[in-house]
Image (cartoon, rainbow, N blue to C red):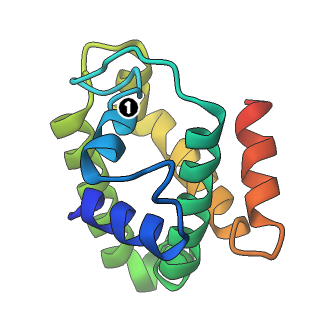
Amino acid sequence: MNGIDSFYALSTKLKLNDVLPNKITIWKLRNNNPLRKSYVNNNIKSEEFDALIQITVEMSKYLYPYIREILNSREEPQTNSVIWKDFYKRFIELIKERFNINSMRVKKLLDHSENDVIIIKSLLTLSLCISNNGYEKLKNLLINF
């Protein structure tokens, strides 16, 4: 929820206003994702890419307790299955709402037999970004993806 507002607040906190001066700029950058319904093919500048990584790392730090709880609930499905099921349901809803469901990559995200691995790997990656070198780790991972 409130993704743009959260991104903008963090960009201000991280003093990234030169690169991300307003919410519209952030919205345009989010629409560079080829999986989205509202995809627009623009080249992202290096400083914009770095700013988005910094925001993602900061958000990961903020959301780490929740990420950890979700991962734990996946490990112990008998005791914490409600947390995983709620997260999973919301994840699928967001994908269907915002992404192009005709794309093969998106279909893979929606395929229950394959998406568990993708979701867990994504959550683990975000949880590893909270360290002191989180920015470098995430940037290297994305560049080498």
Q: Position of residue 52 (x, y in %)?
A: 54, 50
- Residue in the picture at 53% in, 68% down: 15
- Quick check: 122 left or right of 108? right
- Quick check: 137 left or right of 112? right
Q: Based on the displayed image, in which of its 4 quarters is residue 107 positioned?
A: top left
- Residue in the picture at 32% in, 30% down: 31
Q: Residues within 10 Å of mark 1 (few under 14, many from 20)?
A: few
For the N terminus, the quadrant is bottom left
**In-front residue for pair 66/81:** 66
Q: Amino acid at mark 1?
A: Asp
- Quick check: 96 left or right of 22? left
SS under mark 1: loop
Q: How many marks?
A: 1
Q: Position of residue 46 (x, y in %)?
A: 66, 34
Residue 86 visible within the image: yes
Answer above or below: position of 94 versus 29. below
Q: Position of residue 75 (x, y in %)?
A: 58, 72
For the C terminus, the quadrant is top right
- Residue in the picture at 39% in, 36% down: 29
The residue furthest front is: 18
Answer above or below: position of 79 versus 57. below
Residue 75 visible within the image: no
Q: Based on the displayed image, in which of its 4 quarters is residue 105 positioned?
A: top left
Answer above or below: position of 99 versus 135. above
**In-front residue for pair 122/73:** 122
Tag 1 residue:
111
**In-front residue for pair 142/70:** 142
The residue furthest left is: 97
